[in-house]
Image: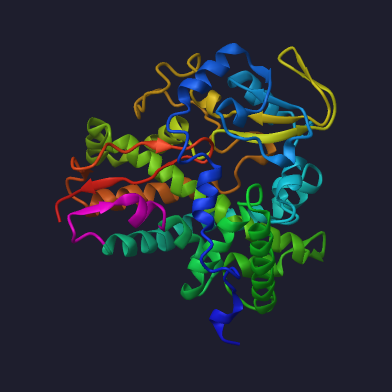
Amino acid sequence: MNAIARISDFDDPGFDPFKTFDTAAGLFEIMDPWPRFHELAARGPVQVGSLREQFGLEEFALWSDVPSYMVFGTEAVTKAYLKAPTFSNEIMMRVYAESFGASINGMDAPEHTRYRRLFQQAFMPKQVLSWGSHLVPEVVNRLIDGFVGNGKADLVREFTSRYPFDVVYAQLGLPKDEGALFHKLAVGLMCIMVDYPHAVEASRKMGDYLLKLLNERRQGHGDDIVTMLAQAEVGGERLPDDIAVSFLRQLLNASGDTTYRGTSALLVGLLTNPDQLAAIRADRSLVDQAIDEALRWDGPLTAMTRQTLCDVELMGVTIPAGAKVDVVQATLNRDPSRYPDPDKFDIFREQKRHAAFALGPHVCIGQHLARIEMNRAVNALLDRLPNLRLDPDYPPPQIVGFNSRAPIELRVLFDS
């Protein structure tokens, strides 16, 4: 079979899932949500209401029939995340079941625990370090090769929005000519709340493709993630195809998208604070704490959604069973009682655990890989782009959006 024929584009190849998703995420409407987040958090840790509606965005129709609550601040956010499965992830199945399928993100214990242990094997420290030593630098440097001689670049368009996805393509062992279309379908899956037909179409086509890959690699000897899942077993039984396909469906968004947004925020923080950029340029041991500061300061997601399985009291407020709960982790990350001057990007501040990757049993399975990718990316840019700085001919970069946040562009100059 011709390799490129294994994956199919949308029936309407002109459909742009990237623009559709960014619009739904408020990327073009919400420029700076932080004053409103601080205002809401000051009103109390648990409140009735929909977070989207607090920002003038229409609530998704799927949730219009359930009561909505919001959770703010360090103590309430931590308790909500750690009180699983009372604050259940099952609501995500309600959202994404027809796009991602039987996702572990929509499971609670014991089912979630059972499958997470297996998937975690793909992200063991030895494997992650191997990717960080060979695969990630290869991808990063290949992209930098494309603009290093120009003396200028848009680091979002030419670098941060591309390199994490190229890493995932390599981890999956995808042929290069299938990566871009795989990415397009993966973002299409995320449009389920605003464009149901296209999301379901993306789910079907990506599912067909991934099942072919699993079957092809069931007897293989590769070290890619698809081969690992194709041959994995749970309790002596092979991992069900639907569970494996679902995990692979969401991997690009869960891994690539968050790393793209996190790296973009990190570069905005450094480039708009030249003294901190100079400090890192002189002492690369500061890179890791700069990464954590960027994730705290403007992490990829501001909130996650849970649903109560029973009546539960949180911070003196009784939340009824079946309620949708927006856990606003951004208000832990910028809690003024926890971080002095929390809206300031400061790589030298005292490091405390943030919630950019969530907390509790659903903490991001790939967070260590994300940090390594961001580390390799920043080091490579500093190594290869001397005197990296903002381009004064363009407005200063701004991270925008309601939940999935990123700068639209990041124009820089450097000595070529």
Left or right, 147 with reference to 307:
left
Left or right, 231 with reference to 414:
right
Instruction: Examine the rendered structure and indicate whether residue 31 appears above or below residue 413.
Output: above
- Residue lying farthest to the bottom in this orientation: 1
Instruction: Examine the rendered structure and indicate whether residue 157 appears above or below residue 42.
Output: below
Query: Count of labels shown?
Result: 0
- Residue at screen point 69% across, 38% down: 361
- Residue at screen point 70% across, 55% down: 118
- Where's the N terminus, which quadrant? bottom right
User: Residue 372: x and y, percent?
Assistant: 44, 49
Instruction: Examine the rendered structure and indicate whether residue 49 appears above or below residue 367.
Output: above
In-front residue for pair 209/244: 209
User: Residue 10: x and y, percent?
Assistant: 59, 68
In-front residue for pair 235/348: 348
Q: Is residue 140 magenta?
A: no
Q: Which region of the structure is painted magenta?
A: 147-162
Q: Is residue 154 magenta?
A: yes
In-front residue for pair 276/147: 147
User: Residue 356: x and y, percent?
Assistant: 53, 35
- Residue at screen point 67% across, 18% down: 46
Left or right, 272 with reference to 27:
left
- Residue at screen point 48% across, 67% down: 180
What colour scheme does the image use?
rainbow
Instruction: Examine the rendered structure and indicate whether residue 175 appears above or below residue 324.
Output: below
Quarter holding residue 212: bottom right
User: Residue 343: x and y, percent?
Assistant: 41, 23
- Where's the C terminus, which quadrant? bottom left
Left or right, 144 with reference to 139:
left
